[in-house]
Amino acid sequence: MSSRLKIGVAGAVHSNMPGDDLGVIAAVARQMRQFSERFDFDLAVWDKPIRSEEDGEAVRRFMDGENADFTLLVNASLPFGRVVLPLSRMRSRLGFWSFPEPTRDGVLQLNSFCGVNLMGSLISHYAGRAGFPGKWFYGHPDSPLFTERFLVTLRALRAVKAIGEMRIGQVGGLANGFENMYFDERDLVRKFGTYIQTRHSVEEIVARAMEIPDAEAEAEIERQKSEARACGVPAGQLEKSARIFLAFKNFAAENRYDALAVSCWPRFQEVYGIAVCGAMSRLNEDGIIAVCEADIFSTVCMAAMKAMTGGKPALNDLVAFDESDNSLNLWHCGVAPKSWADENGVAWERHFNIGRYEGEKWIGDGVVADMQFKPGRVTVVSMGGSFDRLFLLTGDVMKDKKGFDGSSGWVNNVKVNGRSVDIPTLIDTIVTGGVNHHYSSSYGDLANEWNEFAAWTGIDVFDPIPYKPYLQAR
């Protein structure tokens, strides 16, 4: 899955403005070439000033031919308004860029911002594109305001592109009882263009696991042991987990899948006698997105987070609250990548929920990645509906506050879409808002990136629903 963007740059001018608008365009082109190397994107530069509607049409054809993902219209001076009409038909998304006036009095030199004002309103009111998303930029490329806005756009559009290019393999069906995560794959294709295959079975993966050569399985077992601080799993269970991991990895490579949505229970236990949490943890660490309970919404969100940060996202449930410090606990059985672990690292342990009692002794079936999350800022999202509703939370994983067995961490400084919330308001927002119970999580504060992602793709981001003691209907 490639999420490398191509950014287009084209400059528009007005012959009656006395300022050095051509010099502005040349300087911008030079600096954007430096940015393309620094921030890892490709660049398509139209090297002639746009003066007419015909010039705008030529730029449209050029950017479409270059497969530009995002085009910056440099309003070096106040352009002729109709130049934007053909640009509004580009396949590329569009940004409008203006610059400070070189003087504060005397003859107006560029009238650049007025050009951005004109372009945005012209598209909305004349071109029949009311609500057409076009992002404004202001300032020279090395200014903090431009850089901040441009980097947010880069990360958001990398996520949009990555989801459009990704291939998802769903193994088994949606977990029974999790109909809240039911989806129509046609919605996914219409929304993002994502490829998905839903016809794979658990038995297919188990058959692959049983065919793994013994030497390959043994080498994988040793690798797993070397990564962990401890291993409390019987040899037979660890071998099955290693085989499942290798089977998943080979299956993903053979089918060119970037992500696997896995029906992790109960069929794996029925067919192979093992929970696959540990194997999925290792897939996530290896860069193959692996999501529990065949949840496609979280698969999409985790792919977006990976594209935004280059990091390794995780899947969590929100399981507990502590009103004494206004914190919540993120947890799942043990599928987080080991890079999420604090300084104590990861331990491979027997599953604590899936298994049976023999007398008074618990016998867990399968391997979990047992860890406490490392401290740091995290972003947590949950998507639903027809891929058109997004819950967005940020907070800080707390240091030295022990969580639950499995993969777990306590989070404070909680905000929902940028607004601080207490626990009752958080609960009201989640339950009244009908938020899905799976939360895709990533280290880093991605609130800006997710809001821009939502704006480009037509997704509604939840605002907090203030707590009330009565029933609220959304």
Image: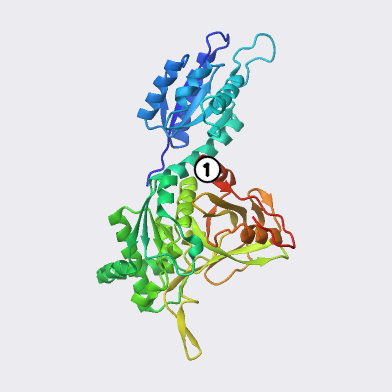
Residue depicted at 46% across the width and 14% down the height: 52
Q: Quadrant of residue 42?
A: top left
Q: Position of residue 408 (x, y in %)?
A: 56, 66
Query: What secondary structure is found at the residue carrying circle 1?
Result: loop
Residue depicted at 49% across the width and 30% down the height: 94
Res 340 visible? yes
- Residue beneath disc 1: 458
Above or below, 65 relative to 190: above
Above or below, 176 relative to 85: below
Residue depicted at 64% across the width and 50% down the height: 463
Above or below, 330 relative to 109: below
The reply, left or right, for residue 257 in relation to residue 8 is left
The reply, left or right, for residue 224 in relation to residue 305 is left
Identity of the residue furthest to the bottom in this view: 359
In this rendered view, identify the residue nearer to me: 342 or 285: 285
In this rendered view, identify the residue nearer to me: 46 or 286: 46
In this rendered view, identify the residue nearer to me: 128 or 51: 128
Q: Quadrant of the C terminus?
A: bottom right
Res 341 visible? no
Q: Position of residue 261 (x, y in %)?
A: 41, 60
Q: What residue type is disc 1 on? A: Gly
